[in-house]
Image: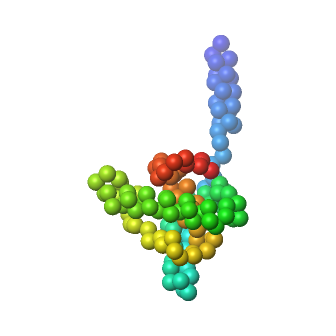
Amino acid sequence: MKKIHFILALISGLIILSCAGQKTIIPKKEALNSSVNDTVKIANKDLEYEVIIIDPGFNMWLNSMAYPRGFYTQSYLENKNILYISEWNNRFLQPQRYRRDLYEMSIDYDSNINYGYEVNYLIYNYMIYFQNNYRQKLLGHVPLR
């Protein structure tokens, strides 16, 4: 009887061990590069502006979850960005009401300047990522991509 319990315990243990997920170890060098790759920077010296987005996970989210470039028109992105950034800046100005660690700085976005498609695309997608990742709702419906 003891042998049967031992064999059952051994088989159960083997089944549990074989069902355990495989662990992946990321080499130190790759782990460091992944944080470097999460910095998105766009600069245009002619217009004298620079957009820098530093948020772990945004670059991976952008490449895997965001709609591709060209899905939205530039006009759509500009209109959404005006609304999102306006609300962002309102929250920045109210540190007693909104977490300062989320709204660390205001965003200088002039609707009279043509920043181009790429800048508007990245800002819009960062706003979607930000709302989903930090559970914030800047306005209206938040896409779940």
Left or right of 108 in this view: 40: right
Closer-to-camera residue (22/134): 134
Q: Which residue lies furthest to the top in this view?
A: 1
Q: Can residue 88 be seen in this view?
A: yes
* Residue 121 versus residue 50 in the image, above or below: above
Number of numbered callouts drawn: 0
The residue positioned farthest toward the bottom in the image shown: 46
**For residue 77, above or below residue 108:** above
- Determine whether, in the image, residue 48 is placed left or right of residue 77: left
* Residue drawn where x is 67% and y is 61% of the image: 72
Name the residue at the front extreme: 112
> Residue at 31% of width from left, 57% of height from top?
95
Residue 51 image position (x, y, % from top left): 52, 73
The N terminus lies in which quarter of the figure?
A: top right
Depth check, front residue: 123 or 36: 123
Q: Nearer the viewer, residue 5 or 95?
A: 95
- Residue 44, percent from left and from top: 56, 82
- For the question of whether residue 29 can be seen, the reply is no
Q: In this view, does 65 lie above or below 28?
A: above
Residue at 31 percent of width and 51 percent of height: 97
What scheme was used to colour the molecule? rainbow
Q: Could you tell me residue 129's position as x and y percent?
A: 55, 56
Q: Residue at x 57, y 65 (%)?
A: 78
